[in-house]
Amino acid sequence: MVKELAPGQNLARGVARCLMDHGFACLPEVVPKPGLRVDVMALGRKGEIWVVECKSSRADFTSDRKWQGYLAFADRFFWAVGPDFPTEILPADSGLILADRFGAEILRMGPETKLPAARRKLMTQVFARTAAFRLAGRDEAAAGHGGPAPAALPGGLTFFP
């Protein structure tokens, strides 16, 4: 039985496919710090970090009060929306990706704001550890065991893979 994805998850799936075609490794739903969860985090070949926030409707966008907090965790920030989304309501000074569950197209590059070295190192570790714990959880589930326990990250952060 195939699980039906929520509209935002379908957008994230298409975004990940697009960014992987551009050489990025992608993870959905990454927690850069407690209280924040980005829809897609992408890690490029040169260590660049992109964050993509997926919005499936006007109401989804207008109810989001946390998105500006994501800017401190990315070299570039993008909105990903479907073809019927009113893009004129999105901030013009951020990237824009048009997506569906099958793929996506980058319509506008987000401005580059290089992360400080310490933040880049932390986010690269968050990305790697999130990926590793998710992979370990899949292995455990396939073997009939429970998933991994919550993981502690540098700086006292905790996330649940």
Image (cartoon, rainbow, N blue to C red):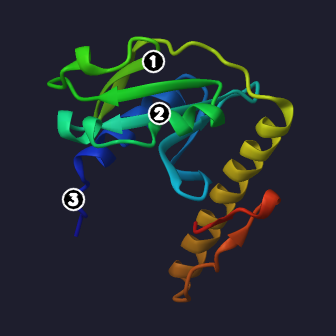
Q: How far apart are marks 1 and 2 (CA)?
A: 9 Å
Q: Percent position (x, y) of residue 110?
A: 51, 16
Q: Is mark 2 on a helix, strand or loop?
A: strand
Q: In this view, does 90 lie above or below 59?
A: above
How many residues crowd mark 3 within 10 Å: few (<14), some (14–19), many (20+)? few
Comparing labels 2 and 3, the label whose residue is closer to the camera: 2
Q: Nearer the viewer, mark 3 or mark 1?
A: 1
Mark 3 = which residue?
Answer: 4
Residue pointed to by mark 2: 52
Q: Residue 84 carries which label?
A: none
- Residue at point 61% right, 64% down? 135
**In the displayed structure, would residue 146 be above or below residue 38?**
below
Horizontal arrangement in the rendering, residue 95 relative to residue 43 (left or right): left
- Mark 1 touches mark 2? (CB < 8 Å): yes
- The amino acid on which the numbered mark 3 sits, given as a three-letter code, is Glu
State the residue position of label 1.
Answer: 95
Is 49 left or right of 79, judged from the image as shown? right
Q: In this view, does 85 lie above or below 39?
A: above
Q: Is mark 1 on a helix, strand or loop?
A: strand
Residue type (three-letter) at the residue carrying disc 1: Gly
